[in-house]
Image (cartoon, coloured by chain):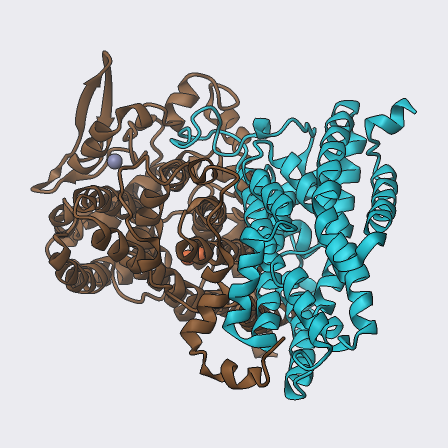
Amino acid sequence: MNTPNPNERLRKLSLKERYAHLTRGLDWQPTYQDKKKIFPFTDYEGIKIHDWDAFEDPFRLTMDSYWKYQAEKERKLYAVIDSFAQNNGQMNISDARYINALKIFITAVSPLEYAAHRGFAHVGRHFEGVGPRIACQFQAIDELRHAQTQIHTISHFNKFFDGLHDPLHMYNRVWYLSVPKSFFEDAITAGPFEFLTAVSFSFEYVLTSLLFVPFMSGAAYNGDMATVTFGFSAQSDESRHMTLGLEIIKFMLQQDEGNVPIVQKWIDKWFWRGYRLLSIIAMMMDYMLPKKIMSWKEAWEMYFEQGGGALFNDLSRYGIRLPKYHEVAKAEKDHYSHQAWSTFYQYSHASAFHTWTPSEEEMTWFAEKYPASFNQLYRPRYDYWAKAEADGKRFYNNGLPQLCQVCQIPTFFTEPTDPTRISTRTKIYNGERFYFCSDGCHDIFEDEPEKYLQSWLPVHQILQGNCGGTTVPEVLDWYHLNQGADNFDYLGSPDEALWENWQSARKRVIAS
Amino acid sequence: MALEIKTNSVRQRQQTFSNVARRLGSDKPASRYEEATYDLQPDVNFHYRPTWDPAHEIFDKTRTSIIMADWYDLKDPRQFYYGTYTIQRSRMMEAVEKNFAFAEKRGLLSTYDPEWQAMVCFYLLPLRHLEWGANMNACNMVDQGYGAAITQSAMFATMDRLGIAQIISRIGLAMGGASTLDQAKDYWVSAPEWQPIRQLVEDSFVVEDWFEQFVAQFLSLDGLLYPLVYGHFDAIGLERGAGALSMVTEFMVDWQEEISKWADTVLKRAAAESDTNRTFLAQWYGEWTERVQTALLPLAEKVLGPTAKDILASLRESLDKRAMRLGIQIEAEIAA
Ligand SMILES: [Fe+2]
Ligand SMILES: [Fe+2]
Ligand SMILES: [Zn+2]
């Protein structure tokens, strides 16, 4: 080569330029195959991109540093997981009721990490622009990491507690797990731009704290150091994912004015889908954490009303407004967790986690956190159930609930203006009547009816005989639900017996 | 007393997850690879058809002609899950960094025989585009593939190919800065010796059957290209004082050896499954290998001169033998 001192020239490359050579520079314009054939999914959603190069890489990461940093994090994480197991860390949690939060996590959240992994691989192959393609590939492998580290962490708890033993089988079958499953499958089956709006922006950027805080701070407050560790270890990945979410939204909005109404529609849809999914988290946060962090209502105010408010203020310069029905969420915040818990309480015989009536101490806390609703509406209900239980008649609802065609949650939410009336909406399509929990879900159906009439609705499937049989025990067998252990009230459960046994053994040790 | 708690009350009630226990035949301790892999991908009760592929389910066995009774039979002999994968690669990368530092400090990548430097720029640097193409193909396997066993390995390979493309790019930057990379891209896009290869890569993007794409990329193309470039081309470089180049491309040599173990294990198992699978694999292998051999010839001739044809033929012969060991026999041989 005719370069006397290449190192001189090398130094002149800025980090940004160097990064560009190591990423975008790899691409070329194909000439032997039609670009449309190589990237067939770029146009069909109606999003117009004029200049893919205008996409700002949200994080300038090359493989050498990715391997290095991620390997360091994995070494630390697995060291913690190993020592947690060796030291029987599961004995140091606040109370065995806490484990139910992990049951929700491994059955409803970890499979979503896996789904995200595959969804990002799809866009990581098919996005026409190199910048977003590489960013999506990084996220695809990160999400695999999350699924696997969660399984490895919770594997230890599974050795002792019920309800954790068959999460992947359950995810594909159990009635309430169709809520997270349909949520993510809705996103994956959408086009690449809607997928990113759904997952990267609406879920990871806008709503992520409402998932992270309950589980990770919840774990920290309740002595589960293993879960805390994987949570915090994933945080640096998440911050990359959030940056991608914001960047892709801004990119779409800047590229073409015609994109604005499409993006707004997706934000509306995915805000509502995500918010409904979080009802399970709201209940877990308020009821399953023996040591509480904050109430669902406080979390909603802090992370959505304030944090989200500022974000949408910022986006208003592109013509984007707050998501439709955000005011419904605001009205529901006094009721959300209580209505969800009351429903699961009644269906505990068909769930792979335990429920219980809250203690007097907890109810005092609820009354303080929910002054407008708890004593008026929910305390009387728990008092009644507690009394029935004391009389040996623990209440279980043997009917099958009506599910919302879109979010697949039983239609138990109440009217935003009247917490004593159940909210249902219906719609006749092709001569068939469909049911919804809310205007939000109704509108989502109306926009894409052909998609949502495909929903695999667990109750319909049971009635059609596709779930192992016609009786409840047969269906629960088909779920692989270990009956008498995984299900029913916490009181009287093997989990409780085990925990009490550990506690008394511990007392004996202290006494001796 | 503390010990007594451990032995008496802290008895494990389960050893592993139920799905893993079913696969192992009983509830017994399982490896992290097994727990992180088995059944991770949803297989039933999908809610909606992809709007981008309404003919299929989200995850669908019929996206390939290969049929497996159990897709989790396509295990990774390296037992890589995310943690072991990244730790292994960071170790390999550490060695690369050391070699780069050594070579760059002494300017070893830009001070050997200038004629050979120009040749390296011609044959090696355009491969960063080929690796980027391989990245897309591996990523497509993660998208279209079936079962977490093969798709997770493909995910790791996806990132590997990006990493290799970046190592090659760094070599280019060390050789002569950004303009060297521009020059190499020109070769890739318009040098006649590169066009059959680029065409083959672009054609591989639109292969509909992801398992065929796997054979084309990881067996046919890599199987001839890697020993040609990092073996035969590199050997000439050593004679011409480019030893430092061998040091910074060591990653690729080690990687190829390692990834072949994975590809071979998967292909061998898929071939062992049925005659139908074997027929498809043989057909794909035959077609693609033939194309690759032809496409590589102009480049090989430019670097190796008149011996190129024989060298390629002998590489082809060993690749055919390797394929045969996996149960993949091309038709001509079956007939003969
Ligand atoms: Fe994640
Ligand atoms: Fe994420
Ligand atoms: Zn709904």
- Of the 4 image quadrants, the one containing the C terminus of chain A is bottom right
Residue B201 in sight here: yes
- For this rendering, which residue is in front, A330 or B37? B37
Tell me which residue sits at (33%, 26%) in the image.
A399
How many numbered discs?
A: 0
Q: Is residue A317 above or below residue B76?
A: below
Please give left or right for residue A480 compared with residue B12 in the image. left
The residue at the far top in this view is A431
Tell me which residue sits at (75%, 23%) in the image.
B276
- For this rendering, which residue is in front, B105 or B44? B105
Chain the render paints cyan: B
- Residue B213 point in image, percent of width and height: 63, 38
Chain the render paints brown: A
- Residue A293 point in image, percent of width and height: 31, 67
Of the four image quadrants, the one with ligand 3 is top left
The residue at the far right in this view is B336
